[in-house]
Image (cartoon, rainbow, N blue to C red):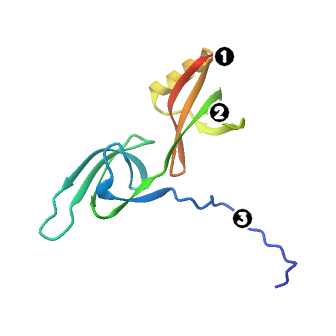
Amino acid sequence: MSDSEEHHFESKADAGASKTYPQQAGTIRKNGFIVIKNRPCKVVEVSTSKTGKHGHAKCHFVAIDIFTGKKLEDIVPSSHNCDVPHVNRTEYQLIDISEDGFVSLLTENGNTKDDLKLPTDDSLLSQIKDGFGEGKDLVVTVMSAMGEEQICALKDIGPK
């Protein structure tokens, strides 16, 4: 191979940051986050069973998927590691709502973000549409975890 050849790599990866981090099952508490069946979930109930004659104490997690709202359960030995998702909340100002259900958001650095759909939660959806229709300045909170994003909250910062 000569040095004059150019190599082109298709880059479809992110910076290599993991979507989750390990945490010992016994240290995960109520209102924490956990990955169950490859879904990021918020823990609503934790119960720990005593160790048996041979074996580990077990943690029984009841959690709700943070994007779909589905209830999931998992039982893990308390000394084992569980995956915990990196969950971020970011606030964006709402600029526009398109007819096909996508929102246009203003980011911190002045760019627009146009790849988010309106939330499926009916009360939040109607609050956003009504507030936008009345011409209010709205700030939406976007929760992101494991490569997914969804609008989860809304704030009114006054009329335009």
Q: CA distance from mark 3 to mark 1?
A: 44 Å
> Of marks 3 and 1, which one's residue comes earlier in the chain?
3
Front residue (pair 116, 33): 33
Residue at position x 78%, y 68% in the image: 8
Disc number placed over residue 10 in the picture, else none: 3
Mark 2 closeness class: few <14, some 14–19, many ≥20 residues within 10 Å: many
Q: Quadrant of the N terminus?
A: bottom right
Residue 16 in the image: x percent, y percent? 59, 62
Q: CA distance from mark 3 to mark 2?
A: 29 Å
Residue type of the residue flagged with mark 3: Glu
Disc number placed over residue 160 in the picture, else none: 1
Looking at the image, residue 91 sits to the left or right of residue 56; the answer is: right
Disc number placed over residue 105 in the picture, else none: 2
Residue type of the residue flagged with mark 2: Leu
Residue type of the residue flagged with mark 1: Lys
Looking at the image, residue 4 sits to the left or right of residue 63; the answer is: right
Q: Quadrant of the C terminus?
A: top right
The image quarter in which residue 3 lies: bottom right
**Residue 134 drawn above or below residue 30:** above
Residue 86 in the image: x percent, y percent? 48, 51
3 or 1: mark nearer the eye = 1
Residue at position x 72%, y 35% in the image: 110
**Residue 40 drawn above or below residue 131:** below
Query: Circle 3 — which element?
Result: loop
Query: Circle 1 — which element?
Result: loop
Residue 76 in the image: x percent, y percent? 28, 60
Mark 1 closeness class: few <14, some 14–19, many ≥20 residues within 10 Å: few
Q: CA distance from mark 1 to mark 2?
A: 16 Å
Looking at the image, residue 45 sits to the left or right of residue 70; the answer is: left
> Of marks 1 and 2, which one's residue comes earlier in the chain?
2
Residue at position x 45%, y 42% in the image: 67
3 or 2: mark nearer the eye = 2
